[in-house]
Image (cartoon, rainbow, N blue to C red):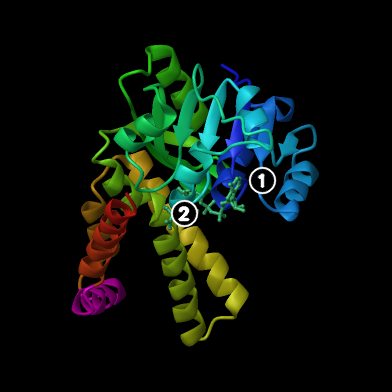
Amino acid sequence: MKLTGLTVIGGGQMARALVGGMLESGCLDAEELTVVHKTASTGTWWTENHPGCTTTTDTVAAVASAKVVMLAVKPHIIAEVMTVQDEQGNSADWNDRLIISIAAGIGLDSLTEQAGHRRVVRVMPNTPSLVGEGASGFCAADGVDDDDVELVKTMLESVGIAAQVTDPQMNAVTGVSGSGPAYVFLIIEALADGGVAAGLPRATALQLATQTVLGAAKMVRETGEHPGVLKDNVCSPGGTTIAAMSTLEKNAVRGAMIQAVQASANRSRELA
Ligand SMILES: NC(=O)C1=CN([C@@H]2O[C@H](COP(=O)(O)OP(=O)(O)OC[C@H]3O[C@@H](n4cnc5c(N)ncnc54)[C@H](O)[C@@H]3O)[C@@H](O)[C@H]2O)C=CC1
Ligand SMILES: O=C(O)[C@@H]1CCC=N1
């Protein structure tokens, strides 16, 4: 299934990753994409990186020409976008369009009220969508039919995996996978720092750290084993790893990670 008539409002980091991944996967052609941007440099980025797409600052016209509208601005800009008017004072017509919001925190009740209809899907994607390894959660309002759900799943699965959850669970999705790449980037950076501290050249340490995270994630996914079992398999009795694990537990890394997820989920609730 190909996506046609997509207008994306806000062409920043997440739109670049998600829509960039969809274009790369072939689920969307650049000719079917319109990006509404605020700054000239963002418009230039899209036309240079995805030739064939349309860029504009006219939200009202871009909504009028769309079948599907993706809201990819910061949460506090959503209300401004939904009530935008053009120079002639015409408002955007959100009717007859599937609305997909990727804004953290903004729930379906608020989105449907602002859209004036209930054909609305809330998505929480993540930036690895850019390389086809995204993890997205989504929930749909009751005006969304099975075809729309299939379309959204096709779109998200073209860049990774997609899990359908409830609207309240979207905050937890934000804590785990929306914000999650940042935690993992921090871990990779810290692993590499440790390698440098132990005497490795920076480039070698970063290469080994990156591949280790990739390999460990792939093992969990492909073996289906519980991560605790896989961890135990690395810990030789009296060996190096259990010495390291003891240090990680003393420094409460497990608790820190749980609290990080909760902090992100709580912040997502606050953004509502
Ligand atoms: N960055 C991430 O990893 C993720 C972000 N999100 C959500 O995606 C949304 C966008 O976040 P980012 O891409 O990180 O932010 P960003 O700041 O990189 O992108 C937002 C873009 O919207 C533009 N913009 C502002 N007002 C506008 C308007 N009236 N019309 C058109 N464009 C306008 C800005 O100039 C900017 O280019 C947020 O709601 C965020 O919660 C969701 C999942 C992950
Ligand atoms: O930090 C943020 O608010 C956004 C939402 C999830 C990831 N980035």
- The residue depicted at 42 percent of the width and 35 percent of the height is 161
Name the quarter where the N terminus is drawn: top right
- The residue depicted at 27 percent of the width and 62 percent of the height is 263
- The residue depicted at 22 percent of the width and 53 percent of the height is 229
Mark 1 surroundings: few (<14), some (14-19) or many (≥20) residues within 10 A: many
Which residue type carries mark 2? Leu
Q: As displayed, is residue 16 above or below residue 265?
A: above
Q: As displayed, is residue 58 above or below residue 172?
A: above
Mark 2 surroundings: few (<14), some (14-19) or many (≥20) residues within 10 A: few
Which residue type carries mark 1? His
The quadrant where ligand 2 appears is bottom left
Q: What SS does tag 1 mark?
A: loop
* Image spot of residue 253 (x, y percent): 26, 71
In magenta, the rendered stretch is 238-252
Marks 2/1 in contact by CB < 8 Å: the verdict is no
Label ID, residue 219: none
* Image spot of residue 103 (x, y percent): 43, 45
- Nearer the observer, 186 or 142: 142
* In magenta segment, residue 165: no
Could one spot residue 141 in this view of the protein? yes
Q: What SS does tag 2 mark?
A: helix
Q: Is residue 153 left or right of residue 4?
A: left
**Label 2, label 1: how far apart the Cα atoms are:** 34 Å
In front: label 2 or label 1:
1
Label ID, residue 214: 2
Sequence-earlier tag: 2 or 1: 1
* In magenta segment, residue 241: yes
Q: As displayed, is residue 269 above or below residue 203?
A: above
* Image spot of residue 72 (x, y percent): 53, 43
**Label 1 sits on residue:** 37
Q: Looking at mark 1, is its residue's CB closer than 8 Å to ligand 1? A: yes
